[in-house]
Amino acid sequence: MTQGPLAARRDLLALVLDTLVPEGEGFPESGALALDHVLAMAAASAEIESLLSRLLEAVERAARGGNVRGFSELGAVQREDLLRRVERTLPEPFEALVRHTYDGFYSHPATITRLGLEPGPVQPRGHRIEPTALPDLARVAARGPIYRRA
Amino acid sequence: MATDDRTDVLVIGAGASGAAVAWRLAGAGIRVVCLEQGDWLDARAYPHWQADWELHRHTDWSAEPNVRRLPQDYPVNDQGSVISPLMYNAVGGSTIHWSAHFPRFRPSDFRVRSLDGVADDWPIDYATLEPYFDLNDRVMGVAGITGDPAYPPKSPRQTPPIPLDTLGTTIAGGFERLGWHWWPSDSAILTRDYDGRRACVNCGPCDLGCPIGAKASTDITYWPKALAAGARLLTRARVREITLGPDGLADGVIYYDRDGHERAQKARAVVLAANGIGTPRLLLNSRSARFPDGLANRSGLVGRNLMFHPYAMVRGIFDRPLGGHRGPIGCSIISQEFYETDLSRGFVRGYSFQVARGLSPIASASGGSVYDRVPWGREHRRAYAARFDRTITVAIIGEDLPELHNRVDLDPALIDAHGIPAPRVSYALSENSRRMLDHGIARGAEALKAAGAHEVAFNPLLRAGGWHLMGTARMGSDPATSVVDAEGRCHDVPNLYVVDGSVMVTSAGVNPTSTIQAVALYVADRMIRRRS
């Protein structure tokens, strides 16, 4: 694929991902954050690449069927409606795309930060748990043995 | 074919049980060689040191060998099973991946036939194993607190319990309001430095290995001690079959070394520690004129009576943050309110509740073990915000009863990278298990609501939940109804031993590793006694 079609495919995929995970609820970031991850998964797996190509072709085909030049010309509500139609037609590839999108989006440092967590590796920092007294187990212990002697 | 020097005892598999038995035998001056198809893992290469650590759970660090597909893995045909078997192939075996939940079987678990008229009694009991439970606890290092009325008194735990934190305290409140049993879980995770190992820093994803050695895996607990005692461990050594001498005794194995060359290792005794699927696979693949249906299989029971623990998952959503990303992923609280048989519930035997930590960012979106993915599109943000860091998942781990039709055999077509037939797993959920899980789902939802959950969802059966592989070379006194005797020796081949989950007669309603290792240590002591 030449540079022009490659860029167009990337733009279309970004729009699809933004429709899957739109901005909102205090999150200015949207699904396009997952773009590099989804493309990397497709590059690493012929199976995923094939599914992605089928999906994007189906999206563009469905958009042109609506008398516009492409998915990019639709408004947000129309894009979502169109993707729901594609989802019904190609449920398994669509589900795979949603999951790869979530994987990419919810592992992105910008998302992690927005969730109130510290991005980056979980080691060596770990997490601090405030020390507290041992729980009160008196009621449970007071029941006496609840196991059967055998 | 190259032949290695004959050794006293050959152990197949370097996981939970193989490591324990190798350590015990080597410590008694017995020459031990262990063959492990995986390799040593470098904790510096664990996903925790990378920003994208959570993504590895679905790829190279998946608990499913059929997903992971690493060179040291073998495929498992699980199309005929409603539960997918999970395992890991490395020094440490599946203790690399486990969440280190460390309850023991209870006394009644060894007397199921006598007490409840189902399954079979074990030929050994809790009292026999108790010193080995304690010994194993000392080597592995257990966090917990004594006094749990669900068990006979235990020796002091090595470190204080895993902190409950906000999440644990919240669900404990639910159990308290209902007046039910609950207790901080015994966990093979250190909360204080112990035996040269560091305390847990609560990073979370224990299921991806523990990069600092706070969680016990046998590559860092038993193996350094076993090697110091003189045991030899050969990695990337995949055993194809166990060989017999003219006297009908096992005389060693044929295996493939890390370069793919076929080799023979001779031994005076062979110990199988390859897990509840790997062990029957090897026995069934070791056919001869003397054993045309597989080695030590005159009973026809090798591979039969496969038990998993069927898991159902109940998840509650709360209206406040719970800090669920902090702390060991699998260990918080156990409840055994519904453990012993009460036939008025509609099933025999029982189950435990295990409370896991909260869901990480990706798992929150994908639905975690309940599998209910957050919707995409305009609803996504609101639905995700309502769920992230506001969930508690209660797992119901039910006792699985042995049934002949649940089994492991050899797949007629599927093979591993060395051309060895792959195992095929056939497993159906019993009606008793279904009723048990349904009861647990209803009671789990009750506990979550009592703790303050405003919404509850459940998964009636966790497919990717086959952590515990048991029963496929069961222990017993009668050679017609069991594969190994009360000392782990095969009835048909008295110098061939099995020490992994295959020997378990029943599965109990708790995680089995503590009991598997106690049995392995007990068998090792019987071998030592017989030798002397």
Image: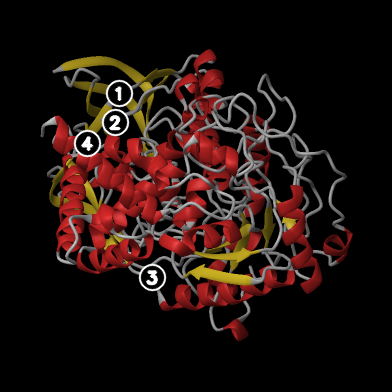
Determine if marks 4 and 3 fall on one subunit: no
| Chain containing the residue with disc 2 | B
Q: Nearer the viewer, residue B189 or B391?
A: B391
Residues at discs 2 and 1 both on one chain: yes
For residue B236, the mark is 1
User: Please, what secondary structure does the residue beneath circle 4 have?
Assistant: helix
Q: Are marks 4 and 1 on the same chain?
A: no
Amino acid tagged 4 = Ala
| For the residues bearing labels 2 and 1, Cβ distance under 8 angstroms | yes
Q: Residue B310: x and y, percent?
A: 46, 63
Name which quarter of the figure residue A3 lies in: top left
Residue B429: assigned label = 3
Q: Which residue is mark 2?
A: B72
Can marks 3 and 1 be said to lie on one chain? yes
Horizontal side of residue B190 vs B372, given as left or right:
right
In the rendered image, residue A99, in percent from the top left (x then y), is placed at 36, 51
How far apart, in angstroms, are the residues tagged by discs 4 and 1? 45 Å
Q: Nearer the viewer, mark 4 or mark 3?
A: 4
